[in-house]
Structures are given as structure tokens and as C-alpha cells.
Image (cartoon, rainbow, N blue to C red):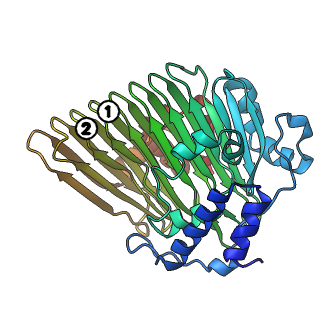
Amino acid sequence: MEKLNEDFINALSMKKKEPLWMREFRLKSFRSFVNFEQPKFGPVIDIDFDKILYYKDSKQLLEDNWDNVHQEIKDTFCSLGVIDAEEKYLGGVTNQFESEVVYHKNSVDQEIIFTSTDDALQKYPELFKKYFNKLVLYNENKYTALNGAVWSGGSFIYIPPFTKLDRPLQSYFRIESASLGQFERTIIIVDEGAELEYIEGCTARVNAKTSLHAGVVEIFVGKNAKCRYSTIQNWSTDVYNLVTKRAIVEENGSMEWVDGNIGSGLTMKYPSCILKGDYASGNSISIAYAKNRQVLDAGAKMIHLGQYTKSNIISKSIAENGGIANYRGKVEIKKKAIGSKASVKCDTILLDGLSKSDTFPTNRVDNDSSFIEHEAVVSKVSGEKLFYLMAKGLSEEKAKELLILGFISDFKNSLPMEYAVELNRLLKE
């Protein structure tokens, strides 16, 4: 396995035929990565970075014709139902296999840019440079630095002013190899008055060795624009899922995160909104379902800068068989953000006496015309409800399943239909 060092970074950048500024950026990021310590909050991260494969070429050139994709890759994505969804429901799709985007199809207006991030660097260099590393900086923490050094793949989307898509765009990320690191970089720009719905799926094959997913997402929501970003990640329990997702929202813009965490051995993910413009709004609704050998540390962050801004966080957590499902979040209403409102609601169900859940909120209001509401509830499955359902002929397992689906109904109702069906399947498994 090739060691991560400056020679590796140089070779990767040259292989991708990148401009000199990007190669220098990668090297600068790598030096920051080496100097950073692990995060001092949240679960303990124990990764041997010398045993991670930082790049794996699928040997598949980027295709826009599914018939030309290698059969092995086609079989993998077809088994996940990704291609069927594209034909029936989506306006465009990007599929990443290992370290590279292998298939991309755009069925919407050609003025809309929807391509891989690597492709955007080559085809739209000025637009790319304007937004790259502007919202999530390489030197924020060890994993933003690592992503900056070895990023590969991801989606680049630009929606022109006043353009409203009638169908979602989707990206799907798949890790197939043991010990692979996947470091996609996604950049989304929704210009003034435009609207976008974007959905993302993530899975990994079950392996006996640790894999790492450390993606970065930067979203720019313009004046009067709207963006909804829906994710269901079902990584195997061999995957460390350490992702930074952040949006900045201009005047009267709206950003919504719909975030589902079903898999991974350890997740640290806190989608964020910076509400910069007056009357901007941010929403996050999420679920985390932790089972044996899983620690899911998830939540959201809302930073209010503009006046009369609004934010809403709903977090649903489920833990069973010794799993740990934590909420960690931050809401800050700054001094100049007068007349702003924020709401946080965290609900957790523990399905047995082995599982755990904690809430770690940071809430701050710096002016006297704004307010934050925070509510947190941790409970066990109701014995009375179980008894009632079982008295109607359901098994204990089916009764618990029905109660869980009811518990997360707000989240499920926020998903596109195909993803809601997939969520049901994953929860039953």
C-alpha cells in the first residue's frame, strides 16, 4: 500500500492533469493534515493512516452511456437500484465507484452544470476556483486537511438564476475495496431565485479492514433561492464516516438538510447552515440508528448572522443492541441577528438496556430580541404500546418495527418516495 507523502500527492495531481495551483493546494493541505491532532470532542477515532488506500482508479473512464460501463461496476449499481431510479425519477445522476466518478448523465437543461468535481476543474476553471475551499477551509481540522490533500470525485452543480428543477439530481458513492479511503468533494451553487433538490446515497461492501470516508460538501444558496440536500448513508460497520457539510444562505434563501445515518462503525457529521442574509432560513431533520459496534455522533449547526433569520433542527435517534446514538449540535444567534428564532428538538428511543444516547447542545443568543427553544427527550420503547400491538397479532419484532417507523415519520415524509422505500428496507434489515 503506497504511503501518503508529498511524492504521492504530486503523483496524484499529475495523474489528474491538474493546474499548478491545485497541486500546491494539495501539498499545503497535506502539511496541515500531518500537524493536526485528532478532534478532541466526540468518539475516540483510532485510524492507522498507513493502512489506508488513498486512491484507487476503477480503470473506468467517465461515461455518459450506461452500456459502456464495465460489467462489474454495472452489476454493483444495478443491484442497488440506482439506475432504475435515474430512469424513473431523476433529472441527472453521478455514480462514484472507489475514487472516481465512473458514470454521469444529465437529463435537465444544458445551461445547468452538473458534472464531477474533477471534470469541473478542467472545464470551468474560473467558476470552480471562485467557490472551491471558500466555505469549508482545508485548515479547519485534520479531516478537512486530509480531504484537501487527496480529494477525488464528488459532484459539481451550478443552477443558473431563476431556474427551478422539477426533478432531483442524485449522486451515489460506493466503496468496494477493503481499507479504501473515499474523499469526494462536492460543490453546489444555487444562484438567485433558483431551486434544487439533490439526493445522495452511500454504501460500502462489508470488509474485515477499516475504511475511511472523509468527504467535504460546500453549498452556496443565493438570494431567494432554495436547496434541499437529502442523504441516506448505509456504510458497513468497517467504515469511519467523518464528513464536513456546510451551506451559506443569502437574503431570503432557504437551505434544508435531510440526513439519514443507518450504517458505519463511527460517524461524526454535523450539517451546518450559515444564515448570512436577512430573512434566511435553515432546517435540518435527521435520524441516526445505531446498532451493535456502531457509534453515531450526529447533529446540526445553525449560525445566525442576518436579521430575522430562522432555523429548525429535528433530530431522531434510535439505539439497540449496545449501539450509541448521540446528538451534538450548535445554534448561535449573533449580536446583529436581531429578531431571529431557532428551535431544536432531540428525541431518542432506546430499544434495550445495553444502548446509550447523550445530547451535547451548544446554544447561544447574543441579542435580546431573539430566542432559542431546545427540547430533548430520551425514552424506552413503551411496554404498553408493545403489548397492545402484540395483542393485535403482531410479533414483538414486527411491533417494534412499527413503533420505530412511526417515530421517524417526520424524517421519512421528507424523503423522495424511492428513498423512503429504501429507508424502510434498511430499517427492517
On residue 85, the disc is none
The image quadrant of residue 311 is top left
Q: Residue at x 19, y 45 (%)?
A: 372
As drawn, which residue projects farthest toward the left?
A: 368
Q: Measured along the vertical axis of the image, is residue 370 above or below residue 113? A: below
- Measured as percent of width and height from the top left, residue 182 is found at 66, 60
Q: Mark 1, residues whose alpha carbon is within 10 Å: few (<14), some, or many (≥20)?
A: many
Q: Are marks 2 and 1 in contact (CB under 8 Å)?
A: yes
- Measured as percent of width and height from the top left, residue 278 is found at 26, 32
- Residue 324 or 72: which is nearer the viewer? 72
Q: Is residue 292 visible?
A: no
Mark 1 — residue? Answer: 280
Q: Residue at x 59, y 51 (%)?
A: 233
The image quadrant of residue 407 is top left
As drawn, which residue projects farthest toward the front?
A: 20
- Residue 239 or 58: which is nearer the viewer? 58
Mark 2 — residue? Answer: 306
Q: CA distance from mark 2 to mark 1?
A: 7 Å
